[in-house]
Image (spheres, grey):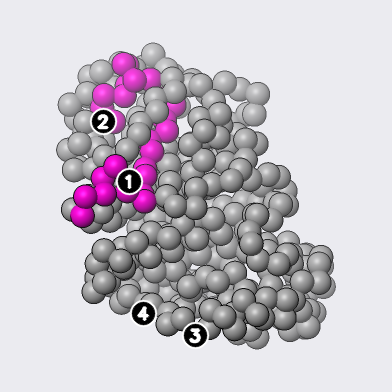
Amino acid sequence: MKGQDPMPNTCPPASNGDSKASWEDSKDIHENTGATKKPKSPKPENAVTIAVSSRVLFRTEKEQMVFEQQGIEEYLRYQVEHENEPFAPGPAFPFVKALETVNTQLRELYPESEELFDIVLVTYNHAHVGVRLINTINYHNLFIERFCMTGGTSPIGYLKAWHTNLYLSADTEKVQEALAEGIAAATMFMSDKQIEVSETQLRVAFDGDAVLFSDESERIFKAHGLDKFFEHERENENTLLDHGPLKSFLELLGKLQKKFYAKGHRLDCPIRTYLVTARSAASSGIRALKTLRAWGLETDEALFLAGAPKGPMLEKIRPHIYFDDQMFHVEGAAEMGAIAAHVPYGIAQKYPHKKNTKTSK
């Protein structure tokens, strides 16, 4: 998947290293909003902490090319020289904006509560690059007060210290490290196109096996085929599936949803969740639903596709993010303009899916 067109927004055009948009272009905007008192950041232990890499929150392809081709010193010089040119939005940008929208509504309903989303910007960059990142955050009117600039070292230890509940990065190896430490994590990619998403409701979609659930059933399917998989699911219909790497994040979303329900906002809740699985409803879906129910969790919508492509369904859902363990489905979503993230977990990582092969399970 290649470079992504900037997300439509009301700010002046931002830069991915190719244009000359500057911080000065939006000076009047920030002078007008500067007097507005910013909300206080919640304590990490009380918040739902989302750690986002600068490479997925913003578009940094040009800068990454400078680093790869000319080295670290030229890269740092380039960043300082362009620090008044804000980065354009990346694939995680709509998700972060939606989190802030939910926070605004939570603060209105629960002014003293710290049960909010808290965004931490994580970057391997040297602190010199921080000026450009801060300028960019202010330019796009984002509320991100916490930074973690590691100067090239692994951020995983810091993620644990921040009580991170979800980590989004462009670096698959670091995502795998986070998953190994029990932190929900996924890899995001630039896409050729991106459909418009809701500005009033956060929409999060999940695959089932190896995402919300363990890869137990996926292992049966990979080793023995579809018929054996169906047989296994029938025999274990009343046996709960073990939890997968994103189960904890769905749990936290459900907890925040209930805060809206308690104030009479079930029908217009600003958080909506989806299960989008290749499982068949009649032959293997019941175990998934029983597992969620036993966990005390639910998704607002559940789509059992019986092997049909997920992309068209995700195009209709228009999620701010969709989590799947198979790159085949992530790529299919991206082709439709849907925002998808890869969870590199489970047995499917050993079986790369061919693009022209139909998904059976």
Q: Callout 4, which amino acid?
A: Lys
Residue 268 - label: 1
Q: Mark 3 falls on what kind of element?
A: loop
Nearest the viewer among 361 and 338 is 338
Magenta extent: 263-289
Q: Nearer the viewer, mark 4 or mark 2?
A: 4
Residue 40 - label: 4
> Measuring 50% from the left and 78% from the top, which residue is drawn there?
147
Q: Which of marks 4 and 1 is in front?
A: 1
Residue 149, x across and y down, in percent: 55, 78
Tag 1 or tag 2, which sits nearer the N-term? Answer: 1
Q: Mark 2 falls on what kind of element?
A: helix
Among the 4 quarters of the image, the one containing residue 99: bottom left
Nearest the viewer among 241 and 52 is 52
87 part of magenta stretch: no
Residue 35 - label: 3
> Measuring 59% from the left and 46% from the top, which residue is drawn there?
196
User: Would residue 218 be found to the left or right of residue 29 on screen?
Assistant: left
Q: Callout 1, which amino acid?
A: Asp
Residue 254, x across and y down, in percent: 27, 49
Q: Name the residue under label 2.
A: 289
Tag 3 or tag 2, which sits nearer the N-term? Answer: 3
Above/below status of 41 relative to 254: below
Q: How crowded is mark 3: few (under 14 residues within 10 Å), some or many (20 or more)?
A: few
Q: Label 1 near label 2: C-beta < 8 Å?
A: no
